Amino acid sequence: MRTDGAPAKTDRRSPLPAWEPPPSVAARTPETRREAVRLSLRILVELHRWRVPPDGGTASWQSTQQGLAQELAASQGAVSKVLARLVAANIVRAERRHVHGLERRVRVYSLTPQGEGLALEIRQRFGLGPPSAPIG
C-alpha cells in the first residue's frame, strides 16, 4: 500500500527470462516458431549466420543495422535498440568495417565469445538448425 491509501502498482512484465519464448511457440511450425522468437534472439541467430571475418576483412551487409532489419522484417529503430542492449551486455560488439558494395566503412555487428555460445544454445533450443552462410 502506498502512504496515500491507493494500492501499489503491480509489475505486469512477463515472468519469463529474456531468452525464453512465449509458451505457445513449441506447438508451432518451424516458420511460425522462428517468427515468434523474440527480436533479440533472432538478431543473435542472424549474426551467427552472417559472421564477420575476424581478420579485418570485408563484412556482409546483413551484419549492419539496415541489413539485420531487412533480414528480420523489423524496423531499423527496433533493431538499433536491441543491438544497443546486446552491446551493453557484452554479447555483441560493434566496429566500423568495410562492407561489400558500400563505398565507406559502416558499423557492423558481430558476436562475442559469450554471444556465440548463446546463439548456439538458441539454435538448439528452438530448432533453428545450423548456420547456412559460410564464415568469411
Image: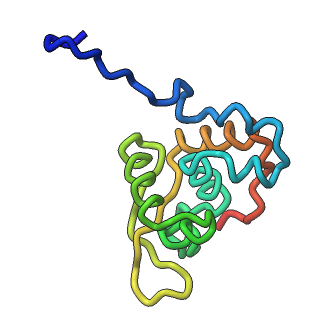
Front position in the image: 60 or 30: 30
Q: For the point 54% across and 88% down, which residue is it? A: 101
Q: For the point 48% across and 87% down, which residue is it? A: 102
Q: Is residue 61 left or right of residue 5?
A: right
Residue reaching furthest left?
4
Q: How many marks?
A: 0
- Expressed as whole percent of the image width and height from the top left, the position of residue 118 reads 60, 39
| Rendered position, 39 above or below 53 | above
Q: For the point 44% across and 52% down, which residue is it? A: 82
The quadrant in which the C terminus is found is: bottom right
Front position in the image: 83 or 53: 83
- Expressed as whole percent of the image width and height from the top left, the position of residue 130 reads 79, 51
- Expressed as whole percent of the image width and height from the top left, the position of residue 45 reads 64, 52
| Rendered position, 113 above or below 74 | above
| Rendered position, 107 above or below 28 | below
Q: Is residue 73 left or right of residue 82?
A: right
Front position in the image: 52 or 11: 11
